[in-house]
Amino acid sequence: MKGIRHLKNLIEINNDRTLGFRKALEDLEPVNADLKLIFTESAAQSEHFAQELTILAEQHGTEVDEDDESVAGAIHRAWIDVKALFGGKDRKSILEEAERGEDAIKAAYKKVMDSGDLTGQALETVLDQAGQIRVSHDRIKALRDSAS
């Protein structure tokens, strides 16, 4: 399958996103406890997405280590950078960093969809996941916009 590299990249950035939100959860102050549910859901979402993508890649004969974090590519590093910036910040800053990470994963999905390399079930899965990522992004953006 021509798009295996793309699936592996999406698996990696989803792993980065999971770890980024988990890091944010560790660092949340009690005043931002309402973000715990959103960040927990987002981490679980990316964990699930990585599993779905791994199954697709493996169906095409590619072995994938689900725990791989991304090791290359600036778009993947955005979530790595976000993980490092979450600690001890005010609500707006936390949400800005989360949105920056969400922008990165949205861009990664867009790049894969624009490549034209995916077809069939792989394309359907990526399109569905991209839609759910957009919803998550917009939710975090709305919270950021309302934060003072």
Image (cartoon, rainbow, N blue to C red):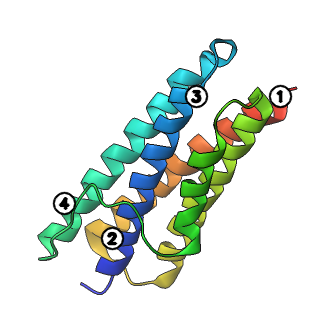
Question: Which residue bears the numbered disc 2?
Answer: 8
The image quarter containing residue 87 is top right
Asked which secondary structure carries label 2, the reply is helix
Asked which secondary structure carries label 1, the reply is helix
Image position of 104 with respect to 57: above or below: above
Going from N to C along the chain, the mark reached first, 4 or 1, is: 4
Residue contact at pointers 3 and 2, CB within 8 angstroms: no
Nearer mark to the viewer, of 4 and 3: 3
The percent coordinates of residue 67 (x first, y second) are 27, 55
Question: Which residue bears the numbered disc 4?
Answer: 55
Nearer mark to the viewer, of 1 and 3: 3
- Number of labels in the image equals 4
Q: Nearer the viewer, residue 12 or 139?
A: 12
Question: Which residue bears the numbered disc 1?
Answer: 146
The percent coordinates of residue 36 (x first, y second) are 54, 22
Q: Quadrant of the C terminus?
A: top right
Q: Nearer the viewer, residue 76 or 71?
A: 71
| Side (left or right) of 72 relative to 102 | left
Name which residue type carries label 3.
Asp
The residue lying at 77 percent from left, 37 percent from top is: 93
Going from N to C along the chain, the mark reached first, 4 or 3, is: 3
Please tell me how crowded label 1 is: few (under 14), some (14-19), or many (20+) other residues with Cα within 10 Å.
few
Image position of 54 with respect to 8: above or below: above
Question: Which residue bears the numbered disc 3?
Answer: 27
Name which residue type carries label 2.
Lys
Residue contact at pointers 4 and 1, CB within 8 angstroms: no
Please tell me how crowded label 3 is: few (under 14), some (14-19), or many (20+) other residues with Cα within 10 Å.
some
Q: CA distance from mark 2 to mark 1?
A: 35 Å
Q: Nearer the viewer, residue 109 or 78?
A: 78
